[in-house]
Image (cartoon, grey):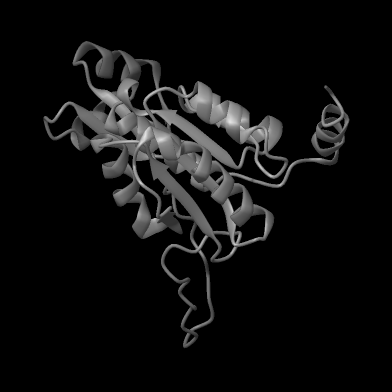
Amino acid sequence: MIYTARQLADLHHGNGQLVLPYGARLTPLAVDWAKSRKIQIGYSNIELPKPVVRPIGITPTQPSPGVSGEGSRALLWWCDGPCGAGKAAIMAMQKESTLQPIDLPNDAGSLAKVVKHLASEIKTGNATGGVILVQTGAAALLFANRCPSLRAVLGTCLQAVEQGISQVAANVLVMEYPYQTLMQIKNMLSRFVRGQRTPSEQVQKQLQELASCG
């Protein structure tokens, strides 16, 4: 759906933010309108509904809350400290996804154990992926990408998450929470939750070739 400046004005409630359905587009005038008023545009993981015609008298089956296209397997998450914005975004998403916390201490010293636990859960099929919220992402990326079952990317922006999903079917999202707002974390998390986590044959072949590197 394409939003005009008038539609944005009708939706705006004076809090400096607007949340639109994922995939929504803005007209040039709408973009100028948002910039001139310093309004931050965010995107939810709820796409615009498509009308469905059903026979009269048949009640549609409602999906269970938090169940994605990959079934009810969990998406695990962990944070290395009091990441208020990150946890708030995750709490907001838990009603719409299978996000579950990793039961390990929230400090940087637990990072290696967290990655090992996450790799084991994904390898055994108990989880489809994971989210790691850290102050700095270097160690998390290094540790995670040493595990054959993990394909970790750094979530610097929504476009980076998109590329991680489309190029390597990333199943681990690392986010540096001190440098992201609540809305930015929620947008990236929303996209990652709905992402495809099965790599293409070409990516699998390339990973196997790289596994032999010294």
Residue 68 placement, left or right of 28: right
Residue 7 placement, left or right of 135: left
**Number of disc labels:** 0
Q: Could you say where residue 39 lies in the image, as x and y percent from the top left?
A: 23, 22
Viewer can see residue 209: yes
Q: Is residue 143 above or below residue 87?
A: above
Tell me what residue is drawn at x 39 percent, y 33 percent. 108
Which residue lies most toward the front here?
109
Tell me what residue is drawn at x 63 percent, y 37 percent. 170
Tell me what residue is drawn at x 41 percent, y 44 percent. 78
Which quadrant would residue 147 be assigned to in this image?
top right
Tell me what residue is drawn at x 27 percent, y 13 percent. 35
Q: Could you say where residue 137 lies in the image, as x and y percent from the top left?
A: 47, 24
Q: Nearer the viewer, residue 136 or 198?
A: 136
Q: Could you say where residue 17 lies in the image, as x and y percent from the top left?
A: 22, 29
Residue 169 placement, left or right of 172: right
Q: Quadrant of the N terminus?
A: top left
Q: Could you say where residue 145 lies in the image, as x and y percent from the top left?
A: 65, 32
Viewer can see residue 7: no
Q: Is residue 72 above or below residue 7?
A: below
